Amino acid sequence: MNIRRAEPKDLTNIQQCNLQNLPENYHMRFWAYSAITWPEVSFLAEDSGGRVVGYVLSSIEPDEEFPWLQVGHINSLSVLRTYRRLGLAKRLMLLSRKAMIESHDVEYIQLHVRKSNRAAFSLYSEKLGFQIHRKEIGYYGDGEDAYSMRFILKQRSLVHRLGRRVHGFVYGRQRAFANWTLRCSKRVNQIK
Ligand SMILES: CC(C)(COP(=O)(O)OP(=O)(O)OC[C@H]1O[C@@H](n2cnc3c(N)ncnc32)[C@H](O)[C@@H]1OP(=O)(O)O)[C@@H](O)C(=O)NCCC(=O)NCCS
């Protein structure tokens, strides 16, 4: 078994693996965009014949609340049925986590998991230290709820968190003011 970084040339094989394992299938554009934009954080496992038997596809996104902070996202993880319970998913996740820390200094890592997916939930919570952040009702296409889970890398002090909130508020006001001035200048131009 060979575990290595995923490259754009692997995308078709990764997509094949995804189609066999998960109902959440992405358009090739999405795979290509991720592989080109964040090439260092996605990994795959291949057998001796070069067939992809497992992968983790990750990305780096801005934090919802504080967009100047970087967050790691696990977009898709799966391992072919005959290769499960060999520790592959755990190894892929740990490699991606290490790469996210080294290359992007992320604040935390985030993912979604179906409420009914016991195998994945147990991997994330028991083996990898993820915690439930919130439940998202009807998150999946078929209406199933998701747990949004996070692995926190930087435990911030209360003062720091308060500072971030103040910073977030000021940043929000600045953006609102900038949008308002833009709207005003458009109106002035229309009147002219
Ligand atoms: C979830 C999945 C990726 C796990 O892959 P894997 O390579 O078998 O996982 P690992 O061998 O690294 O397992 C590590 C731990 O996860 C947990 N785990 C894995 N499969 C499990 C199962 N079927 N039941 C309960 N716990 C399970 C166990 O804690 C396991 O540790 P252990 O073997 O020491 O008990 C795999 O089952 C899969 O591809 N499922 C379908 C796709 C999917 O659900 N992806 C996740 C979407 S959020």
Image: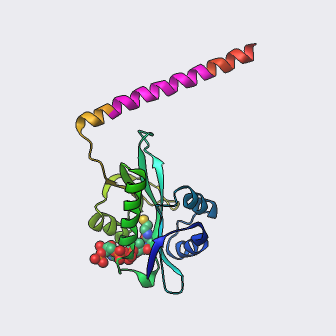
Residue extending furthest toward the top: 192
Asked if residue 166 is among those painted magenta in the image, a careful observer would answer yes
> Residue at horizontal 56%, vertical 66%?
25
> Residue at horizontal 36%, vertical 48%?
107
Majority secondary structure in the magenta region: helix
> Residue at horizontal 31%, vertical 59%?
130
Q: Is residue 3 left or right of residue 158?
A: right
Q: Is residue 37 above or below residue 18?
A: above
- Can you tell me which quadrant of the image ligand 1 is in? bottom left
Asked if residue 100 is among those painted magenta in the image, a careful observer would answer no
Question: Which of the 4 image quarters holds residue 144?
Answer: bottom left
Residue extending furthest toward the right: 192
**Residue 173: image location, x then y, percent:** 46, 25
Q: Is residue 162 left or right of residue 57?
A: left
**Residue 3: image location, x then y, percent:** 44, 75
**Residue 171: image location, x then y, percent:** 44, 29
The N terminus: image quadrant: bottom left
> Residue at horizontal 52%, vertical 22%?
177
Res. 96 in view:
yes
**Residue 169: image location, x then y, percent:** 40, 28
Residue extending furthest toward the left: 158
Question: Which of the 4 image quarters holds residue 73?
Answer: bottom left
Residue extending furthest toward the front: 102
Q: Is residue 46 above or below residue 134?
A: below
**Colour logic:** rainbow
Q: Is residue 164 above or below residue 139?
A: above
- Total marks in image: 0
Question: Which of the 4 image quarters holds residue 148?
Answer: bottom left
Which residue occupies the foreground of this view, 113 or 176? 176
The C terminus: image quadrant: top right
Magenta-drawn segment = 164-182
